[in-house]
Amino acid sequence: MKSDAMRQQLVHLGNGAHALATQILGSTDDAADAVHDSIATVLKRPEAFDPSKGSLKSWFLRVVHNRCVDQLRQRRQISSEVDELIEPGMGPEQSLEMAQRDQSLRLALGQLRNEQRQIIVLRDYMNLSYAEIANVLDVAQGTVMSRLHRSRLALKEELTRHEK
Amino acid sequence: MKNDNSSIDQHVGEQLSGYIDGELTQQERQRVVLHCETCEQCRQNLDEIRVLRKRIGDTRLSTIGADKWRETMEDTTVRTSQSIGWILFIAGLLIAFGIGLIGFVSESGMSLGEKIMIFAIYGGLATLLFSVLRQRLIERKSDKYKDVEI
């Protein structure tokens, strides 16, 4: 793939990648850094992308996902603190500007486990197919549907609780 | 019939998600459709997941615009060209230093003592310059606020 075409696609993927990274890292700033670094890595070696193995979208998101996981490992928070995220990345000023509805969804999303947040963002925010999600998260394709369904039910429950 | 998630799973469960996402086989789709025709609970869940899905899609989960990523690309290009520039500059410097050093050592008009003294002065200056440059580079890399405009 030509570097210019890749750049164009990466610009469009940036937002979704940032949303995914925010859900993993719990901070919009750290997420922006992770996406920034991922873009730099990808552009340094664009030939590493093999179109025969899947779309640029899923490949790039996998790069972002792996970078975030590495970052979490460095922080040594992978198992405990990540699951305790309350409100991924929203500052007070942003919160004021956001509609109440969106805010409660973000809050509810923040109550889910990390893997649940990731799969919801990948499917419902970024519209990835189950095969692409399996590729990004490095899980079996058969796992995706059940994990996604459980995550959606969990989110639905959290939303009901928040909006009562 | 119980109205909770566990009872949903006894029905078509996760296939509801697969159905909404268009990830089921024809046979599985038919099963979901047939089941939902008679099961109000599953039908309701199907609708709720659809609404939820749309809501997530409409929510802004990232507040960073595409311009930021365009800037990132430009930034990366600038950094790459800067790196190439630095490599060429350092390589040139090293070659010039090597040629100078060979010329200096082979210079016959100076005694060994003079050579050692001159080498110590220039070597010391070069070491000091290198350490200052190194320190500046480390500070530049680790300064979180370098992009903050005052």
Image (spheres, rainbow, N blue to C red):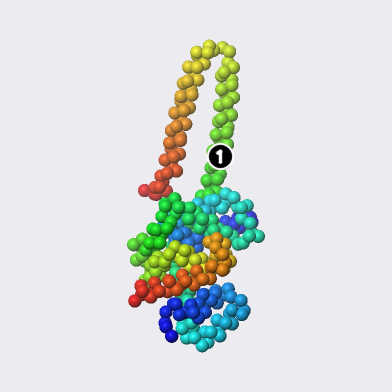
In the rendered view, would you say B111 is above or below B27? above
Quadrant assignment, res A27: bottom left
In the rendered view, would you say B82 is above or below B5? above
The three-letter amino acid code for the residue at tag 1 is Gly
Residue A124 at x, y percent in the picture? 50, 70
For the point 59% across and 24% down, the residue is: B99
Quadrant assignment, res B64: bottom left
Viewer-nearest residue: B137 or A158: A158
How many numbered discs, if any? 1
Residue most extreme to the right: A52
Residue A92 at x, y percent in the picture? 34, 62
Q: Chain of mark 1?
A: B
Mark 1, Cα crowd under 10 Å, few <14 / some 14-19 / many 20+, is few
Residue A113 at x, y percent in the picture? 43, 64
Quadrant assignment, res B27: bottom right
Q: Name the residue beneath numbered marker 1.
A: B85
Instruction: Judge whether residue B84 can be spotted in this image.
Output: yes
For the point 39% across and 47% down, the residue is: B145
For the point 42% across and 40% down, the residue is: B139
Instruction: Identify the image quadrant of the N terminus of chain B.
Output: bottom left
Decide if residue B41 is on the left or right side of residue B107. left
Instruction: Judge whether residue A9 can be spotted in this image.
Output: no
Element marked by disc 1: helix
Residue most extreme to the bottom: B38
Residue B50 at x, y percent in the picture? 49, 77
For the point 41% across and 55% down, the residue is: A77
